[in-house]
Image: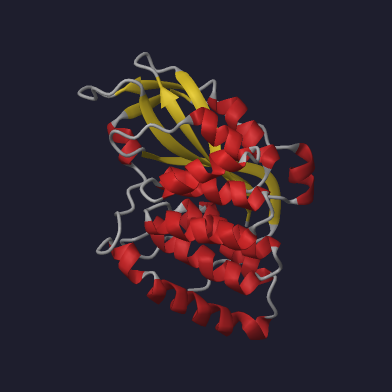
Amino acid sequence: MRTLTSSVFLTIVLLASASAAADGFSLDFERARAALNGAAEDISYLERCAEEQSVCSLAAATAHHLGGQTGVAIHYLRLALAQGKEIAASGLAFANLEAGDPLEAYAWAQLALTLDFPSGEPTRRQLLQNKNAILAARALAALDEDRHDQADQRARELLAEWNEVLSGSGARRFDPDAWQRKVRITRQVRPRYPRRFAQRGTEGIVEVHARISASGEVIEVLPVYFTHREFAREAERAFRRWKFEIREGVEASPVEVTMRIDFMLNRR
């Protein structure tokens, strides 16, 4: 279960994947943004919405994390994972690594890696380029070698705990490519990697929720989950310049999608 170890290169890797918002759902962008700025009434809106919508679970986790309520944030990340958001597992890995618990971080990164490759073992090349494999390698490198077996055991326990969710028998199935049935990207603008983060080796993830017009323009966009505000700002700034084409047969207008953008330094 152990991933490849890595050394640091300052070549920046920004990967993106996305999933479509549930049919008929429309996020209240104004209230969600207010919640992320600390408005209590709007945080309550996200909590109510989270009972049905994974994008609200992610936003609620972010709002509580920003408010210093780590335990509540973890609750909503776990809920988002149960609702089919793979990014929540990555988020829990990042949170534990930053909290000084690389063993737990490794376990969550391995769970996220399982979601990336549900049909079998990844190749060495895929591992070198995968954000969760890189995260797992970082966590493992932070552990004393005599704790590596303990880390593998914890990863197996976590996988067993979430096996029903991963199989899709008790929750929504993970479908990171669902967005492609609704839209096609025609212009993708690369976010800027904050220089001080690159110099420090700081990495992170952002999930944006966006509303796309019939002509493919980004009408609204909001980072609903992020590990660092600086990454969220850069992701939002770049995403506003993206262009899309609505797939033939998609009648909803505008179309809402969620998209993940990873800020990862290339490590080998």
Here the colouring is secondary structure
Report if residue 127 is visible in the image: no
In the rendered image of this protein, does residue 27 appear above or below residue 226? Answer: above
- Along the viewing direction, whichever of 202 and 26 lies nearer the viewer: 26
Question: Residue shown at 50%/48% (left/top)?
Answer: 58
Residue 7 position within the rendered picture, expressed as x and y whole percent measured from the top left? 69, 59
Q: Is residue 11 left or right of residue 33?
A: right
Report if residue 220 is visible in the image: yes
- Along the viewing direction, whichever of 115 and 31 lies nearer the viewer: 31
Question: Residue shown at 42%/51% (left/top)?
Answer: 85
Q: Quadrant of the C terminus?
A: bottom right
Question: Residue shown at 50%/30% (left/top)?
Answer: 29
Residue 214 position within the rendered picture, expressed as x and y whole percent measured from the top left? 34, 16
- Along the viewing direction, whichever of 124 and 88 lies nearer the viewer: 88
Q: Residue furthest front?
A: 41
In the rendered image of this protein, does residue 50 appear above or below residue 26? Answer: below
Question: Residue shown at 57%/59% (left/top)?
Answer: 72
Residue 98 lies in quadrant: bottom right
Q: Is residue 10 left or right of residue 75?
A: right
Q: Residue furthest top?
A: 215
Residue 243 position within the rendered picture, expressed as x and y whole percent measured from the top left? 45, 20
Number of numbered discs visible in the structure rendering? 0
Q: Residue furthest left?
A: 249
In the rendered image of this protein, does residue 164 appear above or below residue 222? Answer: below
In the rendered image of this protein, does residue 182 appear above or below residue 132? Answer: above
